[in-house]
Structures are given as C-alpha cells and as structure tokens.
Amino acid sequence: MKNYNVLLYYCYSQIEDPEKYREEHHLFCLENNIRGRIIIASEGLNGTVSGLKEDCEKYMAYVKNDPRFEKLEFKVEEYDKHGFEKLHVRVKSEIVRSGFSYIDPTKKTGKYLEPDEFKSIKDDEDVVILDCRSDYEHKLGKFKNAVTLDINNFRDIPDHIEELKEKYKGKKILTYCTGGIKCEKASAIYWIKGLIMFINFMEE
C-alpha cells in the first residue's frame, strides 16, 4: 500500500502580500511535514509537494479553504515515500516564467474546454491545435497534427504571434500544454494581440 501522495497544482489569483503569505504557507508545510517546491507570486501559486496522505489532505484543505484558491484543482498521485527531500517556498515575479507578467489570466484568457468538447471539434477543418510547450517537451509527444513552435522557453512565445495571426487568420485555435498554467497566459496574449478566435486549453 502506498501511504504518500504527490500533489501538483497551480492557481492564478491575486496575492496582495506574497512575502507575508510565503511565511504563513512555509510554516504550515513545516508543521505538517509537507516537502516540495512552491512558488508564490502576486499572480498566484504553483507547486509540487509530497507528504503522507493524511498530511496532504490537511494541506489541500488549508489551500482550498482560502477564498483566493477555492477553485484550485489538485492533481494527486500515490507514492511509496516522500517525493522530495526538502521544502522550498519562494517568492518570484511569476508562477511560470513568461516575460509577460502584465497579463492577468483572471481577467482575460481563452475559453475553457472539457475533454469531450475538445475531442468533438479538434478535427474540424476550421480548427488548429497549438502546442504551447518548448521543443524539448513536444518532441516527447504531442497531439496528432498539432502545430508546434520552435522555442526553447515559454517566454519565447510572443515572438511567434504575428506569424500565427497571418497563417491561421479566421481559424479557431485550441491550445494545450502540460497542465494548463502556460495556456492560460498564452491564450490571453494571443487574444490581446488580435488573433481572430481563441479557444483555450485542454489538459493533457
């Protein structure tokens, strides 16, 4: 029986005092033997942590009981030990490095799709599937006929906006990434830059 869980999560939500919240969050993790890597920014949370199942339940309740993160969804995997040796809770300018921190996905982003919605339209003639991940990631696997970008880092995506606008004018764009965190910002920046229609991500 596997007695530990590994939790993956992110949430875009405004945090007015990231340093203060970092101290509170860090203390809770220490008191409940939660280990892993957590990023706190004014735009939200991003983390991967591990702990005993009962400790992870406490942690998930702690996070979701905060009104700022009540819509957060945890991905939970069973494990036979701690997935991490140490705890790191850090304040950064963004929860995923993008280079366009001025974008707030809580105010503007693409339309969210459920998996069945994605499947029902992904093969339509007026639909383009866009992979928002780096070269390294999409070479490991991708959706059939997905458009990939020659980028080493997520922050390089804005360089391809004009190219995409011209090539896929009038098309519906379905984006995807590893967990959604990149797509929320990518769909927002495409929207702001004037891509005709943008439908947001389905998680892999």
Image (cartoon, rainbow, N blue to C red):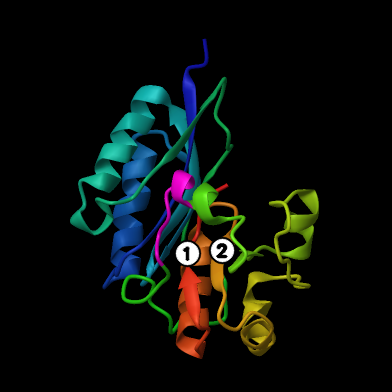
Image quadrant where residue 68 sits:
bottom left
Relative image position of residue 170 (x, y in whole percent): 55, 81
Q: Residues within 10 Å of mark 2 (few under 14, many from 20)?
A: many
Q: Which residue is mark 2?
A: 175
Name the kind of residue labelled 1 in the image: Asn
Relative image position of residue 161 (x, y in whole percent): 62, 85
- On the picture, is 72 further left or further right than 154? left
Compared with 30, 173 (above or below) is: below
Compared with 90, 179 (above or below) is: above
For this orientation, the residue located farthest to the top is 1
* Closer-to-camera residue (102/203): 203
Q: Which residue is mark 1?
A: 200
- On the picture, is 167 further left or further right than 121? right
Q: What residue lies at 29% left-to-right and 70% top-to-bottom?
A: 14
Q: Which residues are magenta?
A: 111-117
Lower sequence index among marks 2 and 1:
2
Q: What residue lies at 34% left-to-right and 68% top-to-bottom?
A: 18
- On the picture, is 92 further left or further right than 177? left
Compared with 156, 57 (above or below) is: above
Q: CA distance from mark 2 to mark 1?
A: 6 Å
